[in-house]
Image (spheres, helix red, strand yellow):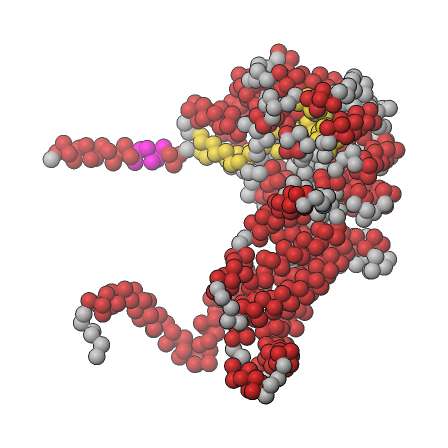
Amino acid sequence: MTDTTGFGARATRVVTAPLRWIFEALDKPFQALQRLGGIGSMPWWFLLPNLLFFGGFVILPLFINFGYSLTGGTRLFLEDRTYTGTEQYAFLFDCGNYADPTSCREDRFWRGIYNTATFIFFQVSFLVLFSLVTALILNRKIRARGFFRAVFFFPVLLSPVVVALIWKWILLRDGLLNAALVGMGFDRILFFVSPEWAMFWAIFVSIWAHMGFYTLILLAGLQAIPPDLYEAAEMDGTSKERVFWRITLPLLWPNMLVVIVLALIKGVQVFDEVYVLTGGGPGTATQFIVQYIYNTGFTNQVQNFGLAAAASVVLGVVLFVLTLVQLAATRRRDGG
Amino acid sequence: MKTVMTRTGASVLALTLAASAAMAQTELRMTWYNDGNEGEVMQGILDRFEEANPDISVTLDVVPYQAILESLPVQLAAGDGPDIARVTDLGGLSEYYLDLTPHLEDPEYWRTNFGPFLNWLDPTGGGAISGFMTQLTVTGPYVNKTLFEQAGVEMPGEGATWDDWAAATNEVASALDIPIPMAWDRSGHRVFGPAISMGAELFDEEGNPALVDEGMRTMAQMLYDWHEDGTMAKELWGSVSGSTYLGANEEFANAQTVLYMSGSWQIPQFATTIGDAFDWWAVPAPCGPAACTGMPGGAALVAMEGTEHPEEVATLMEFLTQEENLAEFYGETLFIPGHLGLAESGVEFATDDPRAAHALATFAAAVPSISPIAYEAQGYANNRVMFNAFISRLGEAIVGELTLDEAFDRMEQDVEQQLAEQAR
């Protein structure tokens, strides 16, 4: 029987009293709203604060950004800027040959696009592969499993700037890695001077920093697979490879899809880690589309907000398409 | 009881009055960046100002230099800037400056002592007085004299060319296994002095920017070749993108480079970080066929038009520009004076370091030989457009993304496109 007079109960009443007062105060207005719009309108009333916040801080800036992309000049406020129509878009897409950035008027935009595409291709492929392998290993009954799960997740907790600085110190001319190479009798490698090495490390560091998060999603998926399926397969004498391809992978596929789409979206948005690690160099070898937008809008003496806004609209369209893919995939998974 | 009440009443009254006084105080905000100890020196002078003017308080907001270049212009454009700021884009931000003239007790003092530099802050030539130079700078090279002595290589003397220095620094580097013979700050401003020496004109007959000419091509080719043959390390100019500034001051302080092309503002830093670890020596600007010049420049403390307290800002600026305060500031910071009276009478620099004293003397002696083109470039409001176009495109050529000729075309297009955008 619950003690409603003891110290614990009284303490609970005291602690929850403010909440009760709030609920009691809200009760009458909500009843009035329900009378006004019927029970069907109530979800909208509950969603209203969030919708206002989302509208004010996400949707409205989106439209303002689109407005900027139709203007030129260096004035900050939209009302002071010159309307230029689609000129900024025309400038971005003015190319002799889209496969050759040097033939484009805004060659850095297209180099940013190609660099981002290269980054995404390798980063997402290896990220998913390594996350899957790690999740499979961590799902097994190995010694110190909890410790290893924490170790793989730890980099996710670090700020991107910290991650980039740690690796920068490792990779510099006199960094840890070069010291080790020289110690072993090899020549120094100037990692940030070679475009290939710079791209390799940008991808590697990004995978290192984010793999833990995706591993966790896949691990959750692996643990949701009913163990009796594996027991049945074992009784049938099914090989381990066949179990993986016929049971694990199909049942893990929904999680894999989430991981792939999330990694794709994050890949398109890549900026902070790489900006601190390589500064976009050497040349423009690791300058991705978001850095192009940042440079165009903020680091030049003539701050070209219109062109930066147009490039970010293009980026927004790409992200929108990827999000639609994710939604479609999720619906298919849920049978919707 | 009555006494207690009386005392309590008096205390409350005193507190109320103190609070009212505090509320009546005008607060000014000054955005500042540091190369060396100048923030500390300025804070000391501001403390004295606040003592002398109890109704005005000044907050020194110290920010990274990058914030002065990137964030301050946006703040100013949004009408959310500070009352006063220390800037290096002297003409580029001039549209946001406050003309202090109507608020100054003696505008003539300013014109007499800051005259030539006021034009840098007012490219329209309207005669506005917006601020003063916290430092005059001259670009030029530093060398590690100790390394030359250890290698037994004679330092090139007066009138030496960049090729002479390249050959000498390579000789020293190979004799002592120094990784970088020569390092330049990754900055267009550093290049333009040597480019003018090689014959670059920078402007056409109408005064419009004309970045790429034979002089500039020659200089760019030299820099390109030095990166190819290892005289300069690609880690500085080739390792980042766009117009990102990278300095080689740490490499020089760690004796990783024989020659470092930078400027006079490094003196206080080297006096502290290098000290007497080795002989760091400023040398005159190397010569080309057209001149032996560095670029002038510097930082200015300017009043901002957006301030709500122009009178108080003017009071503060007048206090800061008093000769004794400026003499203290320049002397303690080891900055070349931007005050003509003090430049003439001389400032007592707070250093007994012979290397710092020699460097100050070298850069001060370089001022008369600065080319008029260099002054024109420094006074040009959009000079950073030219600097950035040069540095970013040459960087792309150095890493092989563009040929030099393609880089020259792109430099011209970048300048043209940005100026057109600004003109809209």
- Which picture quadrant has residue B228? top right
Q: Is residue B226 visible?
A: yes
Q: Is residue B239 left or right of residue B353?
A: right
Q: Residue at x 59, y 62 (%)?
A: A211
Q: Is residue A25 visible?
A: no
Observer-nearest of A332 and B70 = A332
- Which picture quadrant has residue B173? top right
Residue A143 locus on image (x, y percent): 49, 66
Q: Is residue A227 left or right of residue B128?
A: left
- Which residue ends up furthest to the left in the rendered image? B1
Q: Is B64 drawn above or below residue A239 in the view shown? A: above
Q: Residue at x 51, y 64 (%)?
A: A149
Observer-nearest of A210 and B152 = B152
| Secondary structure mostly taken by the magenta-highlighted segment of the chain | helix
Observer-nearest of B151 and A196 = B151
Residue A277 is one of the magenta-drawn residues: no
- Which picture quadrant has residue B244? top right
Q: Residue at x 59, y 15 (%)?
A: B347
Q: Quadrant of the N terminus of chain B?
A: top left
Q: Residue at x 65, y 67 (%)?
A: A129
Residue A336 locus on image (x, y percent): 59, 83
Residue A288 locus on image (x, y percent): 70, 55
Observer-nearest of B64 and B358 = B358
Q: Which residues are magenta?
A: B16-21
